[in-house]
């Protein structure tokens, strides 16, 4: 059944088997290149993850040794927020922090810090 007039000759245009062979060669080359690039990517990712593990390990050991580190960081954040809230209430800078809808300060800022302490002390 092979030869001139066979089913393959009817279905494939002239030069079709050569084009198919070329496409398969290109696909094989693509798969080989992808495999190489994927191997390099995995190696670099592994190296990056090892570096990240080293960084987190060092940070963990620093926190374990210095128990005041987390408290100091938390205190710094709280004091920074109090500083910004104080700037919002300062007479010279107050207008820079006004909202667009109104000229009033937000409710959390309008209440002075420590006002609850004064009531409890009396």
Image (tube, grey):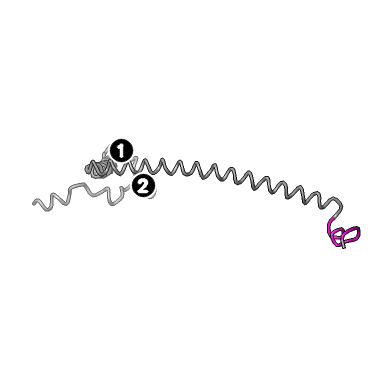
**116 with respect to 63 (left or right):** left
Q: Quadrant of the N terminus?
A: bottom right
Which residue is at the front of the view, 120 or 80? 80
Q: Any magenta on residue 7? A: yes
Quadrant in the picture for residue 60: top left
Q: Are marks 1 and 2 in contact (CB under 8 Å)?
A: no
- Image coordinates for residue 119, horizontal then vertical, percent: 13, 52
Q: Earlier in the sequence, mark 1 or mark 2?
A: 1
Which residue is at the front of the view, 63 or 79? 63
Q: Residue drawn at (83%, 57%), measured in percent from left and top?
A: 12
Q: What's the magenta region?
A: 2-12
- Image coordinates for residue 116, horizontal then vertical, percent: 16, 52
Which residue is at the front of the view, 79 or 35? 35
Q: Residue drawn at (81%, 52%), measured in percent from left and top?
A: 17
**Crowd band around label 1 with a 10 angstrom C-alpha radius: few (<14), some (14–19), many (20+):** few
Q: Any magenta on residue 51? A: no
Q: Which mark is residue 114?
A: none
**Crowd band around label 2 with a 10 angstrom C-alpha radius: few (<14), some (14–19), many (20+):** few
- Image coordinates for residue 44, horizontal then vertical, percent: 50, 41
Q: Residue drawn at (89%, 58%), measured in percent from left and top?
A: 3
**56 with respect to 46 (left or right):** left
87 in relation to 6, above or below: above
- Image coordinates for residue 70, horizontal then vertical, percent: 26, 44
Whether residue 61 is visible to the viewer of this picture, yes or no, is yes
Does dot 1 land on a helix, a strand or a loop?
Answer: loop
| Residue identified by numbered label 1 | 93
**50 with respect to 19 (left or right):** left
| Residue identified by numbered label 2 | 99
* Distance from Cα at disc 1 to Cα at disc 2: 13 Å
Whether residue 89 is visible to the viewer of this picture, yes or no, is no
User: Which residue lies most toward the right here?
Assistant: 4
């Amino acid at each position: 059944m092979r030869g001139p007039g066979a089913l393959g000759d009817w279905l494939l245009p002239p030069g079709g088997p050569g084009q198919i062979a070329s496409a398969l060669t290109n696909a094989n080359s693509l798969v080989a290149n992808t495999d190489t690039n994927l191997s390099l990517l995995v190696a670099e990712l592994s190296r990056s993850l090892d570096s990240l593990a080293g960084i987190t390990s060092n940070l963990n050991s620093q926190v374990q040794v210095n128990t005041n580190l987390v408290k100091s960081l938390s205190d710094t954040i709280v004091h920074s927020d109090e500083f910004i809230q104080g700037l919002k209430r300062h007479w010279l800078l107050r207008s820079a922090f006004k909202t667009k809808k109104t000229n009033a300060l937000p409710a959390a800022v309008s209440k002075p810090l420590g006002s609850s302490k004064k009531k409890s002390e009396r």
